[in-house]
Amino acid sequence: MKYRFGVFSFDDRTLALTRSDRPVPLEPQPARALALLVARAGELITRDELRAHLWDPATHVDFDRGLAYCIGELRAALGDSAENPRFVQTLPRRGFTFIAPVTRDPATEPREAPAAERDAAAVPRDATPESARARPVVVKPWIAAAAIAGAALIVGAAGALMVARDRPPAPPRRPIVAVAVFENETGDAQYDRLAASIADVIVERLTAIGPSRLGVDGNAAILRRPRGARDWRAVAQDTGAAYLVFGLLQERADRLSLLMQLIRLDDGTHVWVQRINRPSGDRLDMIDADAAAQIESAVRSTVLK
């Protein structure tokens, strides 16, 4: 279905958002949130409904932070604001409502076949007049039993032959990435909460890739331990992950930096390392989103190549 509101158009099948027929970049999860909101424009969409719509029940993330990120990205794409909303209105502690007038494009709805076509389709192709039908053939019970026994023997022999052959290899399992809590090594307690929350943003970003393509574990107890008490072999054993993401917030030469690392757990080797530098005293706005974007890119090029 294609929806139109203001200068925008949104296709809920492709999750494509356009403004005056020009594409507007929008990540998959905010796009899925928009699909639910416009489909029920004018209605209250509760926070629990959005949680069920956007995240698999087995996914463990900071829901409040993840939802705030989704709605923030959606508002940014629409040029909307929470203080003076034109599209998405927040109802504190309840949910959200899409308040702009929405029209549906009937050309995108599936066409219902005319009644004559439906009736014709309902008639079997091999249907014949009653007078032309052949009379049923009566099969004696002992002949039917013999035929069934013969068919059973054939099926059994075929099954035994298939078992004897080498089975084709099973399809590859999806890789699992474990995300450990990031650590604050600056010695400044004001950064403790930020460092700890970065992992949740990364889990949310990686989960959006799709659970059929990538498994993400950010909730195992071992991932919450300090780096010195977290052996990579134990991480692999406890989580079944093939890769580990973790990072360190550091201060070097009066500059704050976030060191991010991606480790392959079958041999403990680093496959990707990157550092984000900020001036000392910087508020570190959006550093969690920057880190999540860079790590998603590394996972796509390294783990999902």
Image (spheres, helix red, strand yellow):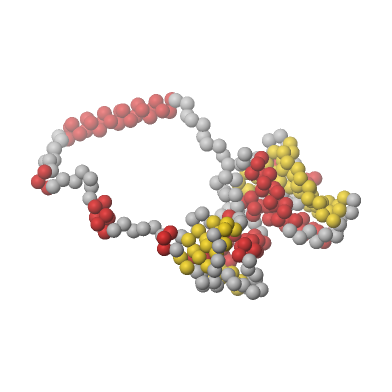
Instruction: Say whether residue 32 is visible.
Output: no
List x then y, in percent, for residue 283: 80, 61
List x then y, in percent, for residue 285: 76, 60
List x then y, in percent, for residue 251: 86, 52
111 or 52: which is nearer to us?
A: 111
Residue furthest right as drawn: 253
Residue furthest left as drawn: 131
Q: Considering only vertical position in the picture, is 135 above or below 187?
A: above
Q: Considering only vertical position in the picture, is 275 above or below 173?
A: below
Q: Residue at x 76, y 43 (%)?
A: 273
Q: Considering only vertical position in the picture, is 248 above or below 271?
A: below
Q: Quadrant of the C terminus?
A: top right
List x then y, in percent, for residue 152: 30, 31
Q: Residue at x 62, y 62 (%)?
A: 77
Tell me if 259 is positioned left or right of 70 in this view.
right
Q: Considering only vertical position in the picture, is 275 above or below 157?
A: below
Q: Residue at x 86, y 57 (%)?
A: 280
Q: How many discs mark residues in the rendered view?
A: 0
Q: Residue at x 72, y 52 (%)?
A: 291
Instruction: Say whether residue 99 is visible.
Output: yes
